[in-house]
Image: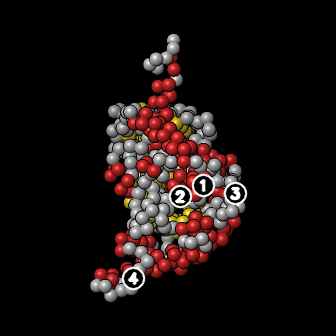
Amino acid sequence: MNGVARVARSAGWRGAGSGRARGAVSLEREARAALWSVGVALLLAVAAPAAAQTVAIVGARVHPVSGPPLDGATVLIRDGKIAALGRDVIVPPDAQRIDATGKVVTPGFLDSATELGVVEIGLAPGTVDASTEDDRITAAFTVADALNPQSTLIPVTRVEGITRAVVLPAPGASLIAGRGVLVELGSDRATEMIQKNPVGMFAVLGEAGAEKAGGARGAALLRLREALEDARDFAANRRSFEAGQRREYAMSRLDLEAMAPVIRGELPLALSVDRASDILAALRLAQDYGLELILLGAAEAWRVAGEIARAGVPVVINPFSNIPGFDNLGATLENAARLEAAGVLVAFATFDAHNSRKLKQGAGIAVAYGMPWEAGLRSVTLTAARIWGIADRYGSLEPGKDADVVIWSGDPFELLTRVEHVFIRGREVPPDTRQRELFLRYRDLRSLPGARP
């Protein structure tokens, strides 16, 4: 099962009814088992990242992303920023020196759509905060207030080289899911973790949107157009609305206020669509209302790549997605390569919480299926940063930018490559994770209480 499908089943992006096919007993058993695992994990202390420091990474093959790779180069980190980069950088005597000869250095990766921090166990409702079934709150819903920096999934993700992520809401009662945030994964406080709030308004069209709107794709588009019309009218006639001299709106006042920056083109509308015809409908909608549009999922985007490129709309895809359904019969692992060749801005996402750590593997698959290696690296760094509006401080290794830096034992897209060091805003991330602690605890069963010698 690919990541998109997994999220759909756990959080309702699509086909939420599939979970009901399972027996209640089986679900309860799975949930209890998963909760036990979390309970064990919560007993294990996970160290916080070390304080910012002066670090010199020397002798590595460095991929700045914004320029060509440099062999035998030095990356100097100071006060959380990239201080210098190149072959002739002078290393200060007080700097921590890391010999990275034979290693590869890149910026930290960005997962452009995940549920990290708002979904711990999909089958345990008490640990899922990605959506609401309260139809009084749709556009105003935000994942920011429920974000859990102590999620056991975050350390597992960041030690695989992912340093930032877009946390998105899942659709609940409405096709408008609400607002997402962009986070960095090195803090243990939500206020420090959130880097951009909101980062986008999220909604679904296509098959999933139709399910929320009575069963027809046209009805989903009508609902969305109604919301946009209401938000536009509300913004232009707010005083009349407050004086009770305006017509009733389909959305609440809080939802209308949340939609205001979308109407002004200041906040992107991230639409989840897969079928080529739905993608074209989304492009028409964005043109009609002057929206800043981002396509999510977009399994059949390659079929209309020319139209997407001409519209200047970026696409966030799951590189693992190649299992066809009625909504995405044209799913292919070559989607990323064909979009990139057509001139579309492409970023990668896992659409998952537990498997966000596999982002580099997904990028490697895209490269294996025709995407140039350099473009694959940009898709999880600088291109992703541009799409979500943080390229001024993240996405490439340049002096003055945040020091999100990863040292790899080799090619980041090779499965056997290890992550050796991860820095997030200049602070090195400890290697401790839930999985590592469990491995150390149970690798020798003879050491357990009551075990036979």
Q: Amino acid at mark 2?
A: Gly
Looking at the image, what colour scheme do you see?
secondary structure
Secondary structure type for disc 2: loop
Q: Secondary structure at mark 3?
A: loop
- Frontmost of labels 2 and 3 is 2
User: From the viewer's perspective, is 168 left or right of 245?
Assistant: right
- With respect to residue 17, does 290 lie above or below? below
SS class of the residue under badge 4?
loop
Q: CA distance from mark 2 to mark 4?
A: 29 Å
- Residue 402, visible in the rendered structure: no
Please determine whether, in this image, residue 235 is positioned above or below residue 185. Answer: below
In the rendered structure, the answer to whether residue 119 lies left or right of residue 324 reads left
Pick whichever of labels 1 and 3 is earlier in the sequence. Answer: 1
Mark 4 sits on what residue? 248
Residue 41 in the image: above or below residue 350: above
Quarter residue 304 falls in: bottom right
Amino acid found under the numbered disc labelled 1: Ser
Q: Which residue is mark 3?
A: 324
Look at label 3 and name its amino acid.
Pro
